[in-house]
Image (cartoon, rainbow, N blue to C red):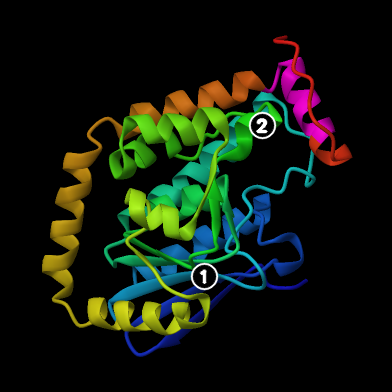
Amino acid sequence: MAETIKVTHAGRVATVILNRPQNLNAFTTAMVSELEKELVLIRDNPEIRAVMLTGSGKAFCAGVDIQEKPYNPLNARIFLKNFNRMLKMVESLPQPTVAVLHGAVVAGGLELALACTFRIAAPNAKMGLPEINLGLVAAGGATFRLPRLIGFGPALEMCLLGKLISGAEAEASGLVNWSFPEKELRSEAELLVKKLADQPPIALSLIKDALYAAAAPHEANDSLMEILSASVNHYTEDKKEGLAAFLAKRKPDFSGQ
């Protein structure tokens, strides 16, 4: 079986690569579990001072692989709890993380990027939360991580309209920290993680923890609300219609049921 997560090391930097290029690096249950295992190893390795997250192939990550299995309220709740635990682990690593974004950065892929400390993107990257267009509910921290970066109004637009924005637009909004031409993206990311790796690790980790604690004091409750909302939504006919339309490449006809 091919590795869905690859990790390389160069000096004090670990690079985590999402590795399902044929599926635009969309998450499966096993992939979430494998990423969490790798994050534990990174967290507990004092030799690693900074982390870079990238996607292989044409995209960073296109979210969750909705064709892996049919989801219902029970298995969706289990998956989302595991997915959110993994995202929280990314956010709470003692090491700073840099998401390197190109191609599709949507749904769970954007939520992974939001959990990182810094985000750099290619100008033509496509970023957003299109779940609403499929009759689904985004439930990987978008409702509390996104507004603190871009503000409440723009977050409403992205969440309720399924609006996609470019990497250049994301830089202007504050969603990403920097935008670079795609051919320069990796080299600029390497410069950033090397600079972070040279910082005093204990002080950096303490400052990072304090900032996140102040920015999201109710994060646990917010995450639970997302998971419950998304789980209950799996009962709806609109969810079935949205996924059927997506797979058939047609416009959905939502009934409100």
Above or below for 219 versus 88: above
Above or below for 141 versus 152: below
Task: In this rendered view, identify the residue nearer to me: 163 or 235.
Answer: 163
- Left or right: 35 as drawn, with respect to 113: right
- Left or right: 53 as drawn, with respect to 30: left
Q: Identify the main secondary structure in magenta.
A: helix
Where residue 206 sits, quadrant-wise, is bottom left
Q: Position of residue 115 (x, y in %)?
A: 39, 52
- State yes or no: residue 143 in magenta: no
The residue wearing badge 2 is: 133
Give the amino acid type for the residue marked by disc 1 in the picture. Thr
Task: Say which residue appears at 75% left-offset and 11% top-offset.
Answer: 255
- Left or right: 48 as drawn, with respect to 249: left
| Image quadrant containing the C terminus | top right
Mark 2, Cα crowd under 10 Å, few <14 / some 14-19 / many 20+, is many
Total numbered labels placed on residues in the image: 2
Task: In this rendered view, identify the residue nearer to me: 69 or 135.
Answer: 135
The residue wearing badge 1 is: 54
Task: Say which residue appears at 31% left-offset and 54% top-offset.
Answer: 92
Tell me whether the residue at label 1 lies in contact with that at label 2, contact meaning CB atoms closer than 8 angstroms.
no
Task: Say which residue appears at 43% left-offset and 29% top-offset.
Answer: 156
Q: Position of residue 158 (x, y in %)?
A: 49, 36
Tell me which segment is drawn in magenta: 234-245
Q: Position of residue 185 (x, y in %)?
A: 46, 77
Q: Position of residue 65 (x, y in %)?
A: 71, 49
- Left or right: 159 as drawn, with respect to 13: right
Q: Secondary structure at mark 2?
A: helix
